[in-house]
Image (spheres, rainbow, N blue to C red):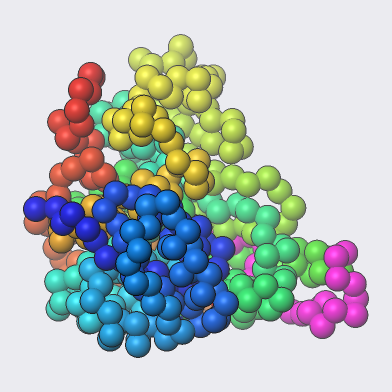
């Protein structure tokens, strides 16, 4: 039975964490009695966010600088973690071992051991760890998910995705803005941020439920973009000018799945360019292609006039609307990356309230995060293929059933929505 009130703590309250905390408090039944950030002003700001919400009912809100103290002292149902890529897992593991569910912001793993630690903590405690991959809940991704599950693409053969986002200022000014990305780009070289498009792709391909990612190869270009930005914007006297950044400007990764599909991922954050996630789905009946963020195209047998030319997808999207978005559009879409942030938070809060499996579980989380450290290994070894571990330990061939519901990412559960035609 769903709890009336779920107590969720928030750890990491910079740009992402504070925005998401504000939105989380709009989810029915959520209260946040504890917030944490190592930067005292940010922790204090977290308290303000909670207290300034119109829904705030006057409960006590405590702030912490140390997540261990918070998790030891507080009686929470879950924590939402938006710290840095190299701290998400250790905080999530600590949380699960202290009896609370964990939702972690997106980012890749630094080691395979880190992924196993998450899996073991979840299996041993019965607490879940959900990667908060908001892109799984974006409107177009959900419509495409529904189309794939309806068989409109035929059998899926190949998918592509990317994180192509000009972050030169955010990365270069990481010390001034106390932002976590900079040191990763200075010292690492690989697919640092794989999950925005990999999340929806894994769900299309039934990864960890009848399919899995088995191996990958990665190749990194040279690195020039950050230095050029620093030269133009900070000058040649700035201490990072000429720094030999390790991260290649464009890192390309190719993944092979057990059922034969291939997936290409592109990481591209250091060159001037418009934002794009480069989504592409190719099946035996046709293709979807994100040419730019706003130019979505498709060619599908029996759906578009021809498969030799593309048609505009955005115009026709309402025909394929996922019922979650149909309902959401009716109720009023909330702010946060076009609305998807509120949906992923709602999915997380629902699983916490029910004390049930989340739609993105610890096996999905581990498999997706592992792509980062495996791609670093591949790049370091001259693009050698590296195996991707099976974090389900064989269960992917015959898993226990998933939990059906509105936020389900395994099938479209039309019957869970009131008044749905289709
Ligand atoms: N899903 C999305 O669309 C989306 C968008 C933006 C950011 N993100 C992700 O959210 C995370 C946070 O992003 P950001 O831009 O706010 O990063 P950031 O580096 O600006 O902020 C991280 C915050 O965590 C705090 N922190 C670090 N270690 C901590 C610890 N051990 N205990 C408590 N607090 C700690 C820092 O002081 C800082 O306030 C990143 O993983 C990022 O990739 C996701």
Coordinates of residue 165 in the picture (x, y in percent): 63, 53
243 in the magenta segment: yes
- The magenta region covers 232-254
Residue 261 in view (yes/no): no
Coordinates of residue 108 in the picture (x, y in percent): 45, 68
Q: Is residue 108 rendered to the left or right of residue 15?
A: left
In this view, the residue in front, 370 or 121, is 121
Is 66 located above or below residue 278 in the figure? below
Q: In which image quadrant can residue 327 be found?
A: top left
Residue in the picture at 23% in, 68% down: 77
Is 247 located above or below residue 317 in the figure? below
Q: Is residue 319 rendered to the left or right of residue 74?
A: right
In this view, the residue in front, 124 or 39, is 39
Residue in the picture at 30% in, 35% down: 324
Furthest residue toward right: 236
Residue 399 in view (yes/no): yes
Coordinates of residue 15 in the picture (x, y in percent): 56, 63
Q: Is residue 404 rendered to the left or right of residue 61?
A: left
Coordinates of residue 115 in the picture (x, y in percent): 32, 75
């Amino acid at each position: 039975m769903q709890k009336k009130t779920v107590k969720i703590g928030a750890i990491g309250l910079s740009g992402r964490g504070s925005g998401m905390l504000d939105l989380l408090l709009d989810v029915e039944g959520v209260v946040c009695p504890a917030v944490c950030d190592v930067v005292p002003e940010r922790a204090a700001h977290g308290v303000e966010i909670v207290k300034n919400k119109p829904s705030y009912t006057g409960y006590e809100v405590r702030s912490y600088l140390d997540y261990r103290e918070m998790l030891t002292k507080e009686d929470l149902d879950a924590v939402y973690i938006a710290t840095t890529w190299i701290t998400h897992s250790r905080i999530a593991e600590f949380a699960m071992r202290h009896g609370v569910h964990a939702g972690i912001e997106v980012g890749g793993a630094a080691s395979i051991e880190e992924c196993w630690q998450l899996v073991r903590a979840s299996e041993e405690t019965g607490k879940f760890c959900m990667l908060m991959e908001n892109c799984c809940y974006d409107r177009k991704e959900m419509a495409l998910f529904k189309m794939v599950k309806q068989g409109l693409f035929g059998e899926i053969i190949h998918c592509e995705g990317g994180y192509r986002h000009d972050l030169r200022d955010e990365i270069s000014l990481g010390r001034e803005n106390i932002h976590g990305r900079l040191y990763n780009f200075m010292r690492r070289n690989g697919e640092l941020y794989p999950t925005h498009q990999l999340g929806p792709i894994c769900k299309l391909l039934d990864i960890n439920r009848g399919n899995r990612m088995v191996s990958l190869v990665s190749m990194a270009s040279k690195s020039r973009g950050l230095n050029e930005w620093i030269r133009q914007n900070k000058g040649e006297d700035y201490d990072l000018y000429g720094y030999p950044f390790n991260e290649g400007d464009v890192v390309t990764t190719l993944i092979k799945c057990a059922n034969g599909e291939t997936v290409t991922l592109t990481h591209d954050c250091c060159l001037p360019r418009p934002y794009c996630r480069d989504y592409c789905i190719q099946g035996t009946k046709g293709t979807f292609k994100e040419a730019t963020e706003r130019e979505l195209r498709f060619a599908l047998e029996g759906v578009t006039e021809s498969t030799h030319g593309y048609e505009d997808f955005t115009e026709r999207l309402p025909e394929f609307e996922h019922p979650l978005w149909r309902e959401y559009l009716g109720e009023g879409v909330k702010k946060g990356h076009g609305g998807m942030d509120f949906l992923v938070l709602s999915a997380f809060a629902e699983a916490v309230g029910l004390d049930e499996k989340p739609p993105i579980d610890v096996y999905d989380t581990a498999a997706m995060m592992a792509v980062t450290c495996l791609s670093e290994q591949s790049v370091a070894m001259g693009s050698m293929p590296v195996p991707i571990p099976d974090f389900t330990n064989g269960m992917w061939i015959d898993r226990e059933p998933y939990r059906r519901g509105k936020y389900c990412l395994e099938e479209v559960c039309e019957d869970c929505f009131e008044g749905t035609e289709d």
